[in-house]
Image (cartoon, rainbow, N blue to C red):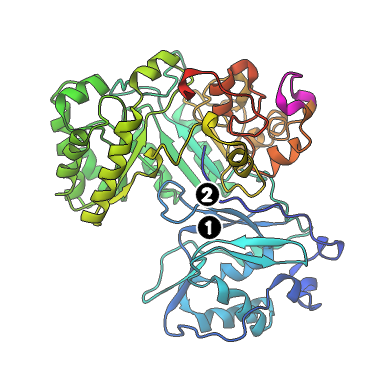
Amino acid sequence: MVAIAHVMQIQVVNEELNKGSLDNLVKEKRGSLILPLFIESIKFEYMKYISLNPEYVLKPDKGRALILTKDVLRTELPVVESVIHPIHAMILSFFDGTKTIEETVSQIITKLEIEKELIIRFITPIIENDHTIGVNITENDIIVFPIKTLIYSDMPILREKYDYSLFYYDNLNLRTDRHFTPSRITFMATTRCYTNCIYCYANRRTDISPLPFDRVRDIIQEAKELRVVSFDVIGGEFFLYKYWKEMLQLLLLHNYTPFISTKVPISRKDIEFLKQIGVKDIQVSLDTLIPEHSVKLLSVKESYINGIKETLRLLCSYGIEVQIHTILTSINSTINDMDSIYRFISNLDYIRSWKIDVAASTLYKSESSYINIKSERDDLRLLVDYFESLKKANPKIKIISGDIDIDNNPNPNELSSSQKLAFFSHKRDIFCAANYSSLFILPDGKVTICEELYWNPQFIIGDCKENKISEIWNSSIAKSLYYLSLEQIQEKSPCKKCSIFTKCRQEYGGVCWREVIKAYGNENWDYPDPRCPKAESVTKKIYI
């Protein structure tokens, strides 16, 4: 599940615009319908370079354009996947970071034949904006531009360049709907692991025939041709994948910057390789630096700690930024454990951030196994205060600990009716990207919609050994799962008689399939999200 900024539903604009093109929309003076006129005066930084924020990318998507966060796992801005008008995308495509605002606007006027006033009044609100900007495209319809859509710089900015003609269209389509091609792919390279973590959520099947690497090469090429925005890799342990070097090189060659996470001590030679091919950052999982606790948590030898410490020193010495990721359990939810990590990383120069999460229940272990390892609430409350004190004492290290505050993250049974209604209204700003904009490739080439569903047959939408990515994405199975009909829902499901079923599933954010199955079991995969006001109470101990 990926958390993304949801844009309100956009209906196709009036029939006049349905068959619009750049020429008839602009030259016939319908620009006021598309370019907002709400700025009376402006003051530009004429001497600075201006760019579409490198954190965002533009993507044509059959009659509409998308503005997307390039890397959801690295950004510090709210993650966005927004529909915008193709003409908006055309204009934004000129902001490539190599020109001043005056030069850029002049180029837009020449190429697109749009009046300067319209351009100025469109771009002004989205330059260094500190909040999202809603734009009226008709009297009733709006689209949303993200925070800091356009940014200034004293120096040229290196970012992807676009040909504005990519966004020409025959039939306008501004619906907030499933992407016509996938925008994000994650590839699980292997199920093999270096550790045996007590909190592991994964299905660690080993009876699989791995996807041939030649086919992996083809998939990466297909992704590029489909304008897939991000291509990430995970394990198991990625560094135990036989072809990890070849795959990283290939992804970087295609301008992908995969997010790499590891628990394995990495040799100096391999770190030199990472630096050489252009890897700029890496996530290292680190739950404690108390040796006896690491043994209990990870099933490793006490010497493991020294190996991880040396890995962190080496990564920093080569200028590779590190994100530390910590999972809290009943074993390490203590200030002593967290302090052991803090004392060490606070003396390193390239620690970008420290993210702390709480161990979650899994579909692949028993309820009792989770109950035995879950953190106590009182311990978590103490750690909330501890991390807040560190943030004030040492702002050098960015500490991300919001998700451990259980008072602000209640389980579904603790939500009031009004809280459930607020969460599940059309205004909610998180939804599941699975099969909406992303897909997940398993080690054997099977394609599922979510990394935590693995080989669940209900959610397998294709096989890379047999089909191309585009064929899988547009398969009847994939579409049927996304455009789920009431006829596919069993009678006992509360969704069966829901009056907003279609809007909920396709427009309002959908459900988290993982949470549904965790709450109600695999046989009830078609139940509502447990946070829905119409959902049944969850009786499983993992929620109590």
**Which residue is depicted at the point 41% across and 69% down?**
157
Give the residues drawn in magenta, as a range: 487-496
Residue at 18%, 39% in the rendered image? 339
* Element carrying mark 2: loop
Q: Nearer the viewer, residue 502 or 392?
A: 392
Q: Is residue 97 left or right of residue 484?
A: left
- Do we see residue 484 in this rendering? yes
At x 33% / y 27%, what residue is drawn? 376
Residue 535 colored in magenta in the image: no
**Amino acid type of the residue tagged 1 in the rendering:** Val
Which residue is labeled 2 in the image? 229
**Is there a contact, CB below 8 Å, between mark 1 and mark 2?**
yes
Label 1 sits on residue: 57
Using the rendered image of the protein, determine whether residue 320 is visible from the camera's viewpoint: no
Distance Cα–Cα, label 1 vs label 2: 7 Å
| Amino acid residing under circle 2 | Val
Q: Nearer the viewer, residue 244 or 280?
A: 280
